[in-house]
Amino acid sequence: MHWVQKGISHAWILVVISELVSWEGVQTWNYEYSLTNMAWPAAREYCQKSFTDLVAIQNQEEIHYLNQMLPRNPTYYWIGIRKIGGVWTWVGTNKSLGAEAENWAAGEPTPGGEDCVEIYIKRDIETGKWNNEPCTAREKRALCYLASCKAASCSGNGECVEIIGNYTCRCNEGFNGPECEYVVKCDDPKLPRNGYRHCSPSSGSFTYKSVCNYSCVEGFSLNGLESLQCDSSGRWSSTRPTCEVVKCDDPQLPRNGYRKCSNSGGGFTYTSVCNYNCVEGFSLNGSTSLQCDSSGRWSSPRPTCEVVKCDDPQLPRNGYRKCSNSGGSFTYTSVCNYSCVEGFSLNGAESLQCDSSGRWSSPRPTCEVVKCDDPQLPRNGYRKCSNSGGSFSYTSVCNYSCVEGFSLNGAESLQCDSSGRWSSPRPTCEVVKCDDPQLPRNGYRKCSNSGGSFTYTSVCNYSCVEGFSLNGAESLQCDSSGRWSSPRPTCEVVKCDDPQLPRNGYRKCSNSGGSFTYTSVCNYSCVEGFSLNGAESLQCDSSGRWSSPRPTCEVVKCDDLQLPKNGYRKCSNSGGGFTYTSVCNYSCVEGFSLHGSESLQCDSSGRWSSPRPTCEVVKCDDPQFPKNGYQNCSYSGGSFTYTSVCNYSCMEGFSLNGSDSLQCDSSGRWSSPRPTCEVVKCDDPQLPRNGYRNCSPSVGSFTYTSVCNYSCVEGFSLNGSESLQCDSSGRWSSPRPTCEAAEQRQYVTKVAIGTAGGASALLLSLPFLGYCIKKYRKKVMRERLSL
């Protein structure tokens, strides 16, 4: 038991119950059923679609088998019986249900519209019985079968009967064998002695319905039936007839006479002869010789012996006589001399003398017409003769012909001449012969001729080798004219129709002469961008059909690549499909760049020329921190992407050179170059007149934290701060000092003191305060520069 799952809308699962038979080439009757309940019409449609039909229950053994193997279904199983035209009918065979095959449950079938039949499987009571049900109102499982019987089963000579796991053949009358392959044969009934036989068919074997017709040769009659037929039991319809010789009645002995007959064993048969004579003093009245002919009659009436008189011997017909009688009477010693006209011969003495007994010394001669021997009827022939009385005489003519199928060999007409010989030898009837019809090229034949010649009714059956078909009659018979019933057939090579070239494809065929014949092969391929749908190679088979349907060339298709996120595409496909040479051009929304090929084409292999591109967000390079500056950016995930912003500032003592804000644009570039932090510069404080300075650095420009220490030449004193430092605003910490002459300095000091009043003590301490401030600033600058 095996399970088969069908992917149909009802999702039925089939359980196949079968015991597979291992005989090679034999398919057994298998049972199948669905696990889904359905109405009877749907159940039959299901069985016919997937198998053969709903089951036809054969016998109790089958019912027992089904009841064991099938699972119980509460609503039971549909089988293949339905009421059609008021008659319960097996739907698979369209045969009415006979009373001997009925298996109804008690009280079933019920009248009304319940026209379909279920079988009770594994029911507690009446299991295996039938019940009629409405065809559509209730649903049950379908119980199907896959038939073993095929069209060729039982050799076409019998009825194929399904049985569990196999089939058997019920042979037609006259046939037997497991497949009804053997026709019943009868023994050869043999040819009866002295007879003829004509049997049909004349192939040499005697089978069912063979008929043999019998007849006998001349002089013999048939004892038994003229026709015998081979019956279905292999016996003839009657015993073989015999040919018995024709008999004549005993002609009896004439009174006062005697006879001598050629018969033996006491019977008078065909060609028996009796010769008659009379005792002395009596004369024979009638024929002296009687012969038994083929009709069972004597050639003449029985003669009698009359008392002898010398009657007038008369003039023989067709003869002459010269007698010595006188006074008109014929007396003892009367002599008559006889002769005959041409064509007649004297039968008797040439001279007659009347003796004392009143008899002529010899019987009166007669002039008998010259006789020819019976030329006999040729075998298988006819004749029509002008003779009368059963003899062939001068001028008798026999015309000859033959039965159908035989031809005359010799003269058609024979005449008996005056010498008693026939004008020609007797003709014969030779069986008509046909020329050897020969074996057709690439063909076979089987002929009924024997002895190597083809005669009347010979039959030749023709067939061809594989790949060739018969052009002409399958069977030829030699007719009575010596011609065959039809011209000899020929074996023409089987041809297939031109399978045509598929659109957008190529083919290379092995045919020659423009036609496609048996074993011709066509190999198919497609132009670039098209793929073959079907078999690559087709072969013309022996039935004149191609091994497969002609393939087609379908345009190659590529999968839909879909739209990339944050991107656009424009494709050349039409109708919604992407086929060979279809092109898709890709781009991205602002701020995203295409990663991959901008243009993809569907190639001949059904693949795109490149992987689908993606739209990656535009990235800008890291603008880096400016030296001596600060950077504050809005990037995420560690990268600088479209619309990222970086704001810049510088450390104290440095000024920003460039934009203080940069934005990553859609091209992946920053809106401005990265700014730099340039050290703050102070103008050159110049050298005071009559003074010195010592600046650090000592060369170049004066930048933030640069310090210039001032002093004056002798005789001058410094007016202002001794030390100037360039601050973060680009200005010096104090105005540039001057060198004043010493007297002037004292004057200034005095003036200052005088005007300052009580602040003189504080002013005197300013140089020390300036020194401390200077030292502190230098320390801060060193710390900043070290950063």
Image (tube, rainbow, N blue to C red):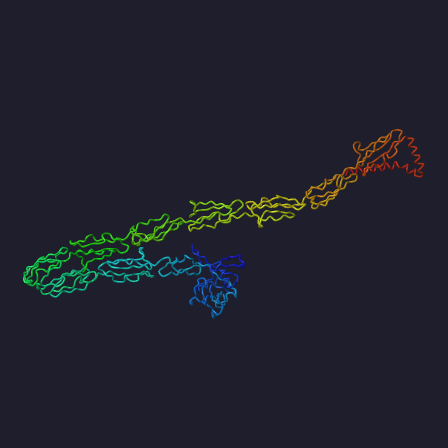
- Name the quarter where the C terminus is drawn: top right
Q: Going by the picture, which residue comes out furthest to the bottom?
A: 107
42 with respect to 482 (left or right): right
Query: In this orientation, does residue 572 appear?
Result: yes
Residue 16 rendering spot, x and y as whole percentages? 49, 59
Counting labels gives 0
Q: Which is nearer the eye, 617 or 407?
A: 407
674 with respect to 83 (left or right): right
Query: In this orientation, does residue 178 appear?
Result: no
Quadrant of the image occupied by residue 669 = top right
Residue 486 rendering spot, x and y as whole percentages? 34, 52
Q: Which is nearer the eye, 349 or 456?
A: 349
Q: Going by the picture, which residue comes out furthest to the top?
A: 714
Residue 768 rendering spot, x and y as whole percentages? 87, 36
11 with respect to 356 (left or right): right
On screen, residue 556 above or below 245:
above
Residue 649 rendering spot, x and y as whole percentages? 76, 41
